Amino acid sequence: MRATLAMTKVQLRILRNDPWFLVIMFGMPLVVMPLFKQTMGLSLVASGFEGASGAEQVVPGQVVLFGFFVGGSAGFSIFREHGWKTWDRLRASSASPVSLLAGIAIPWIMIHVAYQAVLFLAGGLALGLRFNGGSPVAALLTMFGYSVVVISLIMLAASSFRTVHQLSAVQNVGAMAFGGLGGALVPHDQLPGWAQAVAPFTPAYWAMDGFRSVFLEAGGIDDVLVPLAVMLGAGAVLSALAARRFRADETKEFFA
Amino acid sequence: MLVARGIEKNYGDVSALVGADLDVAEGQIVSLLGRNGAGKTTLLSVIAGLIAPDAGSVQIGGMDAFAKPRSVASLVGIAPQATGVYPVLTVRQNLEFFGELAGLDRRARARRASEVAERLGLSDLLDRMGGKLSGGETRRLHTACALVHTPKLLMLDEPTVGADVATRAQLIEAVRELADEGAAIVYTTHYMPEVEALEAEIVIIDKGAVRATGTQAELIASHSLRGVRFQTDGFVPAPTMGFEPERVATDTYRVLGDIEMPDLLDHLGPDAGRLVSVEALRPDLETVFLAATGRRLDAEGGEV
């Protein structure tokens, strides 16, 4: 617990000292969102959501899409310790490997939730996204669930791969494939049939399901419990697999 | 404080350690002396719990290091050979983090960070980012991170590699002070002058095994060699020389024993004019190392 807390604090401190990655990751979706707002608005209206502006799809969609990219940094943090040659120092301490892993995952879950919340806030200010009767708490719970499942998935990938390029490939492909299939780019009901069938196997689908309930259907906490449960359940399984797969003495190549 | 017995470690067909033993008492500095690849780092890594051995035992502070790795880890400070500090944290943040990881509370780690920074000449750099330090400063911070929790057993793996003269002197002074305060210290190096400066108990390690142990004086008394080493311009057939020199490199030979320079010239006869260089082997750590391993060390830890 002590080691996890120390690791959590140092991860946050590193990000505070070098925040440019997050700054860029905030900026990119804010540039992309306005480009698709009108098209998504027409698409939502065609799907029966009268009065939708498009922000209800494009803001959550970009949050989910870029959320996967941001989540990838949790995995890079492990590789970075190897690149900085600090990993052996951590291993030589009295901290257990799992507590070190948790000390990297937990702060990134916190960062990931904050990232989504700020993007939603910015989307609200810039594109006029409103709750329209939906529950802010339900939106926050959905963000939390999505953060847990994404970070867990990335930690499993980081535990399994030896080079940072392998992890990077998973991050990029995962973001685009999961985002596309999960309805982050276009609404799920407008995807091809086969894509709609596989969509529930992606974290993005469940996150978009929760956000759709809140922003398009005025949903409350009850309405996001299913996607929340699925994401937390998947996150628990993926975290357990990551902890089981994680080998503290495995050499990881930061520059491969 | 440290008792390691019969440590073996194999990587496939390569034996990195073949029954290495090591003892270090409180307040004692033990210098592991060996060429690159001799097994020094592997031995330290096994003791620190970073590598699992194939055989052997390690007791630290009376505890079985393999049975209670977490309990033992709090007694140990290690500065691996490759410098490992956080470049985007300040010197103070680096020190306090490793203190916190070792269980120091806020006040204790702040105090210890200041103390070790002062000891290693980092006090004026506490608020500088790790990535903005010079090579020597980084090396000192790297070592300081291993000291911050006041370990009972400190292991420094080639702590002065790439360090400037001032840093080297500062580190050696700090190591001696820590030993005076009661820490058991293992210091690996291939620099003979450092071993002499530390006045350490010397353990010569080669091909994964301990070849000789003792103080400098003891080792010189028991292992050192006299003789000459010379280089010729072109191959000189042994019969011409009149004695049996040992060929140690291309056109480089060694004769052990109480041979004097005139004897060598006499023996070489007409080939004396082909001498390029002659070096007398005097009783010192270098010849101890030569006697114990059959090889000499160059400045980079390679063999000559």
Image: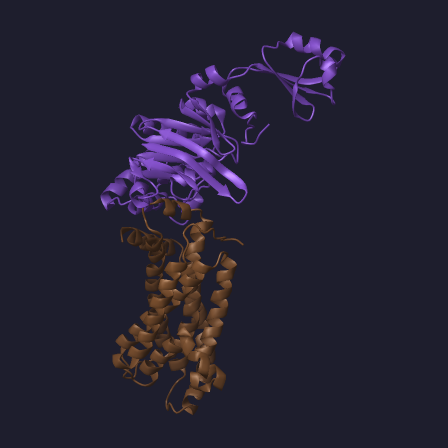
Q: Residue at x 53, y 21 (%)?
A: B291
Q: Is residue A256 above or below residue B279?
A: below
Query: Foreground residue, A128 or A103?
Result: A103
Left or right, B115 with respect to B221, comes to left
Q: Quadrant of residue A70?
A: bottom left
Report x, y in % for residue B64. 32, 39
Query: Foreground residue, B276 or A129?
Result: B276
Q: Is residue B63 visible?
A: yes
Q: How many marks?
A: 0
Q: Is residue B79 visible?
A: no
Quadrant housing the N terminus of chain A: bottom left
Q: Which chain is purple?
A: B
Q: Quadrant of residue B107?
A: top left
Left or right, A237 with respect to B265, comes to left
Left or right, A169 with respect to A23, comes to right
Quadrant housing the C terminus of chain A: bottom right
Report x, y in % for residue B108. 24, 41
Q: Is residue B260 above or below residue B126?
A: above
Query: Foreground residue, B162 or B205?
Result: B205
Report x, y in % for residue A105. 35, 60
Report x, y in % for residue B154. 35, 35
**Colour basis:** by chain
Q: Which chain is brown?
A: A
